[in-house]
Amino acid sequence: MVHFRVAALSDTGPVREINEDSAIAGPRLLGVADGVGGAAAGELASATTACVLDARAQAHPGLAPDRLLRTAIAEAQRMLATAVRADASRAGMATTLTAILTDGEHTAIAQVGDSRAYLLRDGRLAPLTRDQTMVQSLVDAGRMTPEEAATSPYRHVVLQAVDGEHPSDPVVTSLDLHPGDRLLLCSDGLTDVLSPAALQMVMGLESRATVAERLVRGALDAGTRDNVTVVVADVVDGPPAPGRGAQVGAVVDPANIIAPAPYLGLRTA
């Protein structure tokens, strides 16, 4: 039976006034949600989505991971839609989401938008997600090179998000994880400025907390202009220790969670 040992860290960065990223990191669930920059209430969208996912994972530990991820994302989308109908100033609120959930035997990953997940195995770092962005679609079609995509002014235009207007269609797939694997989930404030080679070098350090700190500091030193959020998780064998893990970023403030009453009790159980 596998579970996660985790470290998580989020920084507002040198440019943004608020942190619109949210992350959850527990023994069964990992997630990073990045409120869409420039849109209304990105911090509400990311915090609410992360909170719903966390609460549902705790409330239904026996549900198949792929089914639970889809159900929680749909519930978060409905909450955002209700919030927009109640307050027109929230129109456009949206968030990305990358999440990994395990029940000990089966593991699934869900992707909406351009936050990313990576797997470090035997010293090699490999991507687990593919950006759902305009430029990535052009790269896939052979109309843009990866080098051009990295500097395109449209590189942050996502084709899909968890929002209050359009039901999302998350890409949900199974993961085959083994004890000894290490996972990284992150917002694009990290990957905009650090190369995969740089990520791989830091991910090989022994301490998860040190990895998280070095990655965030590296992004800040490299001149990121966005919020930076990372979750580092080691895959280990055996029953998980009690506790729900860590939450960082916008999700730690209940004021950022739409209609928090049904969820806060579960978050602290």
Image (spheres, rainbow, N blue to C red):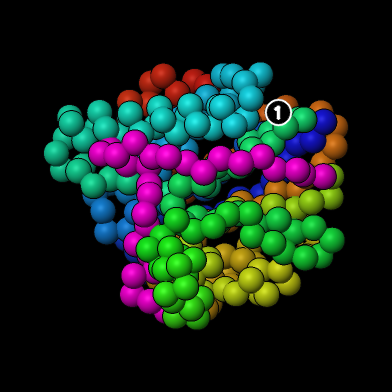
Give the residue displayed 75% in from the left and 36% down from the top: 3
| Closer-to-camera residue (44/191) | 191
Name above or below for residue 193 compared with residue 188: below
- What is the x, y in percent for residue 211? 69, 62
| Residue at position x 75%, y 43% in the image | 176
Residue that badge 1 annotates: 103
Residue appearing at x 51%, y 76% in the figure: 146
Question: What is the magenta range?
Answer: 150-178
Q: Is residue 227 placed above or below 269 in the rendered structure?
A: below
Q: Provide the secondary structure element on which disc 1 rests.
A: loop
Percent across and percent down for residue 1 are 82, 31
Is 100 on the left or on the right of 204, as rendered?
A: left
Q: Is residue 229 above or below residue 239?
A: below
x, y percent for residue 185: 59, 53
Give the residue type that dot 1 points to: Asp
Q: Position of residue 84 (x, y in %)?
A: 21, 35
Indicate left or right for 164 with 218 as reference: left
Specify whether residue 150 is in view.
Answer: no
Left or right of 69 on screen, residue 77: left
The quarter of the picture where the C terminus appears is top right
